[in-house]
Amino acid sequence: MEKHIGIYNAFGKDKPEEVQPQYHMNCAEVLLRAANDEYDLQLQEVSFRMLQGFGAGFYSERTCGAFSGSLAALSAMFTEERPSEQEKTTRAAKLLVEEFEKEFGSLDCDYIKKNHRDEVVGCNPVKLRAGQVFDRVVKALEKE
């Protein structure tokens, strides 16, 4: 995941500085895109656009976008076709909450920004660590 997160964190940095914000991808988008690339989820572009509103904790510093993007990716990976019991997705969600809280101390964007965001590169380190959490969750689920 690290390689893919790095690519999306740098997206648009080759453009003139005044237009770089137009290329920025929020934490939710980056995590979903990285998981799509890493795990070959074959998601369509509309899937990533759907995560725009999840950035910056729903733009109200609530649930972290990196968490939301990770949960969306896990859902894409483990949700069965209907009808299904959804046991794997339920386990994935619970395990992600547990591991994310261990890593960051909270699911809240406000808390994570105050305690883990970098002054220079923003939430890029948070996205990298969230990707590591995601990989740990996937490995644990694959062992079950």
Image (cartoon, rainbow, N blue to C red):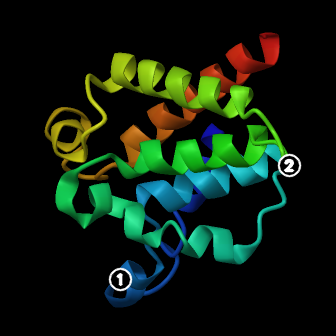
Mark 1, secondary structure of its residue? helix
Q: Looking at numbered disc 1 in the image, what kind of residue is underneath it?
A: Glu
Question: In this figure, which residue is indicated by the disc labeled 1?
Answer: 17
For image coordinates 26% across by 29% down, the residue present is 106
Q: CA distance from mark 1 to mark 2?
A: 44 Å
Whether residue 9 can be seen here: no
Residue 37 is left or right of residue 60, and the answer is: right
Whether residue 138 can be seen here: yes
Relative to 136, residue 79 above or below: below
Residue 36 is left or right of residue 133, and the answer is: right
Relative to 73, residue 13 above or below: below
Question: In this figure, which residue is indicated by the disc labeled 2?
Answer: 81
Q: Which mark is first along the chain, 2 or 1?
A: 1
How far across and how far down the image is residue 14, in percent?
A: 52, 76
Q: Looking at numbered disc 2 in the image, what kind of residue is underneath it?
A: Glu
Crowd class of label 1 (few under 14; some 14 to 19; many from 20; radius 10 Å): few
